[in-house]
């Protein structure tokens, strides 16, 4: 009975703020990715020669849905072409965001999604693209 009450308390605590859980990715290989809403973050082998930016927000925009952020420990390399959708095959497109470089574990935060804790490494951000309109999907 006491154990059941403990679990009920955990569920009630989680229900107060369900999105503030942190999803921890213990390890990730080159080519694998994680998703946070409309942002995909893929481990890559090497970084581009893009310029570092002070902007900590990964997705362009001013809406609550665009607030995917990293802390100051991460070097963010801005895509010099901006977040433009580019067709890569007949019915396939991609939208490149910034690259992330971190020697240590870091967190990608968002007010409407669970936070993501990732191991250090080099990452490429992509934004979801609608296959019908070939436009970037926004949270």
Image: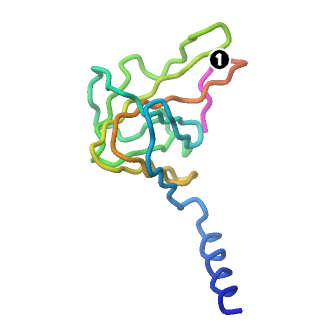
Residue sitting at x 54%, y 13%: 86
* Vertical side of 111 occupied by 34: above or below: above
| Coloring basis for residues | rainbow
Magenta span has 126? no
Main structural element of the magenta stretch: helix, strand or loop? loop
- Front-lying residue, 6 or 39: 6
Residue beneath disc 1:
134
Which residue is farthest bottom? 2
Q: Quadrant of the N terminus?
A: bottom right
* Vertical side of 34 occupied by 81: above or below: above
Magenta span has 138? yes
Horizontally, residue 123 falls left or right of residue 2, namely: left
* Vertical side of 1 occupied by 72: above or below: above
Q: Position of residue 45 (x, y in %)?
A: 36, 27
Label 1: few (<14), some or many (≥20) within 10 Å? some
Query: How many labels were placed on the picture?
Result: 1
Q: Position of residue 8 (x, y in %)?
A: 68, 81
Q: Position of residue 58 (x, y in %)?
A: 43, 37
- Front-lying residue, 41 or 131: 41
Residue sitting at x 59%, y 25%: 136
Q: Quadrant of the C terminus?
A: top right
Residue sitting at x 57%, y 51%: 113
Residue sitting at x 56%, y 40%: 35
Callout 1 secondary element: loop
Q: Position of residue 119 (x, y in %)?
A: 38, 47
Horizontally, residue 136 falls left or right of residue 84, namely: right
Read off the magenta span: 135-139
Which residue is farthest top? 90
* Vertical side of 134 occupied by 26: above or below: below
């Amino acid at each position: 009975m006491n154990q059941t009450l403990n679990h009920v308390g955990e569920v009630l605590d989680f229900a107060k703020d369900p999105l503030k859980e942190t999803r921890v990715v213990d390890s990730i290989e080159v080519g694998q990715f994680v998703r946070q809403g409309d942002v995909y973050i893929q481990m890559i082998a090497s970084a581009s020669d893009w310029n570092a930016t002070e902007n900590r927000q990964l997705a362009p925009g001013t809406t609550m849905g665009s607030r995917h952020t990293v802390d100051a420990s991460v070097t963010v390399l801005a895509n010099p072409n901006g977040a433009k959708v580019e067709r890569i095959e007949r019915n396939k497109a991609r939208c490149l965001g910034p690259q992330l470089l971190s020697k240590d574990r870091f967190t990608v935060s968002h007010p409407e999604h669970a936070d993501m804790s990732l191991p250090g490494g080099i990452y490429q951000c992509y934004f979801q693209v609608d296959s019908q309109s070939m436009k970037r999907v926004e949270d």
